[in-house]
Image: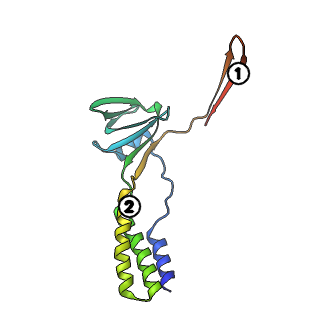
């Protein structure tokens, strides 16, 4: 019974990680505030880390290495920010695992409580070490096909590139 209750509690209090719906450029300003550390992935798959300044219809302004830089939204694949994973869920998961595991193995309530406290602390440390990021913007996927002729003195051919 104790195991079933612990499993039920774990399932009820730890929501499934559903994929976040990406924001549009219009709502990007509402999801970020000035001073947030953001990670921008551009169309060349380079990650740029900076401090959010402002967003307009066509550009995103960041403070990168002490300089204000503007990036065209057309060149940005996604924007994430720090945060998103609260510390309490690591404590809760650790406490449930420690309390249920220690309490059922020994049939001793005091041992179950001490296991919950110990493993709750372990869960908090693990949760603190995780660098959580929240997706705040993702550009619409673009599919492209490029066909380039390759002509050389010794070779002739075609290079085909498909991007999706």
How crowded pointer 2 is (Cα within 10 Å; few <14, some 14-19, many 20+) is rated as many
Q: Position of residue 128 (x, y in %)?
A: 35, 59
- The image quarter containing residue 124 is bottom left
Q: Give the SS element for disc 1.
A: strand
Instruction: Report if the CB atoms under discs 1 and 2 are less than 8 Å apart.
Output: no
The one of 115 and 148 positioned closer to us in this rendering: 115
**Total labels drawn:** 2
Q: Which mark is residue 9?
A: none
Left or right: residue 39 versus residue 164 is left
- Which residue does the numbered mark 1 point to in the structure image? 158
Q: Residue at x 51, y 57 (%)?
A: 18
Q: Residue at x 57, y 35 (%)?
A: 142
Q: Residue at x 43, y 84 (%)?
A: 103
The one of 144 and 26 positioned closer to us in this rendering: 144
The one of 53 and 162 positioned closer to us in this rendering: 162
> Relative to residue 54, is residue 127 depicted above or below?
below
How is the protein colored in the picture? rainbow
Label 1 vs 2, first from the N-terminus:
2
Q: Give the SS element for disc 2.
A: helix
Q: Position of residue 20 (x, y in %)?
A: 48, 52
Left or right: residue 155 versus residue 75 is right
Q: Residue at x 45, y 42 (%)?
A: 24
Q: Position of residue 131 (x, y in %)?
A: 39, 52
Left or right: residue 17 versus residue 153 is left
Residue furthest out toward the top: 153
Q: Position of residue 144 (x, y in %)?
A: 61, 31
Give the distance between the C-alpha atoms of the residues marked 1 and 2, in whole angstroms.
Answer: 50 Å
How crowded pointer 1 is (Cα within 10 Å; few <14, some 14-19, many 20+) is rated as few
Image quarter in which the C terminus is found: top right
- The image quarter containing residue 117 is bottom left
- Which residue does the numbered mark 2 point to in the structure image? 127
């Amino acid at each position: 019974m104790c195991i079933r209750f612990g499993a039920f509690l774990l399932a009820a209090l730890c929501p499934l990680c559903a994929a976040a719906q990406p924001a549009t450029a219009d709502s990007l300003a509402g999801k970020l505030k000035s001073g947030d550390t953001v990670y921008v992935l551009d169309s060349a798959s380079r990650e740029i880390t900076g401090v959010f300044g402002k967003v307009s219809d066509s550009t995103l302004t960041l403070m990168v290495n002490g300089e204000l830089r503007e990036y065209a939204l057309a060149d940005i694949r996604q924007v994430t920010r720090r945060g998103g994973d609260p510390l309490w869920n690591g404590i809760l998961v650790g406490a449930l695992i420690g309390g249920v595991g220690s309490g059922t193995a020994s049939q001793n309530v005091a041992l179950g409580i001490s296991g919950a406290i110990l493993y709750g602390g372990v869960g908090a440390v693990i949760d603190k070490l995780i660098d959580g990021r929240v997706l705040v913007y993702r550009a619409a996927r673009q599919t492209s096909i490029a066909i380039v002729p390759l002509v050389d003195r010794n070779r002739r051919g075609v290079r085909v590139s498909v991007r999706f």
